[in-house]
Image (cartoon, rainbow, N blue to C red):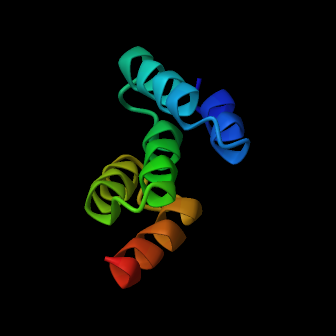
Amino acid sequence: YSLRGLAQLRMDQRTKALDDIEKGIQVDSDDEFTFYARAEYFMAIKDFARALADYDQALRIDPQHRESQAGRELAVKAG
């Protein structure tokens, strides 16, 4: 779900993207990539506080998740 959600986000299909990403979280709430994907969605809509929360959740699951580390830095700077 998270990969399809990211693909939809990149095609500017935000509603579909969030729906898929949310389904992914329901299926596996211990998948850091799904929280990263939702953080990317929140970054796209400029909701930096929620993006930061999801990057943090991804990093709690996997502290070495590089994409979340980089995204978190951007969210902090933007917010």
Q: Total label count?
A: 0
Q: Quadrant of residue 76?
A: bottom left
The answer to whether residue 73 is above or below residue 50 is below
Q: Is residue 32 above or below residue 65?
A: above
On the image, the x and y values in percent for residue 38 come to 45, 43
Image height of 47 relative to 26, above or below = below
* Residue at figure coordinates x 42%, y 52% from the top left: 42
The spot of residue 26 in percent (x, y) is 37, 18
The residue depicted at 40 percent of the width and 50 percent of the height is 58
Residue at far bottom of view: 77
Q: Nearer the viewer, residue 11 or 2?
A: 11
Tell which of 66 and 47 is nearer to you.
47
User: Position of 6 compared to 40: left or right?
Assistant: right
Q: Position of residue 57 (x, y in %)?
A: 31, 50
> Could you tell me which quadrant the N terminus lies in?
top right
If the image is split into quadrants, where does the C terminus sit? bottom left
Residue 41 shown left or right of residue 11 in the figure = left
Q: Nearer the viewer, residue 68 or 16?
A: 16
**How far across and down, in percent of the image, does residue 17 sit?**
56, 32
Direction from residue 66 to residue 53 in the image, left or right: left
In the picture, measured across the screen, residue 26 lies left or right of residue 15, that is left
Query: Which residue is at a point 55% across and 37% down the rendered structure image?
Result: 14
Q: Residue at x 63, y 42 (%)?
A: 9
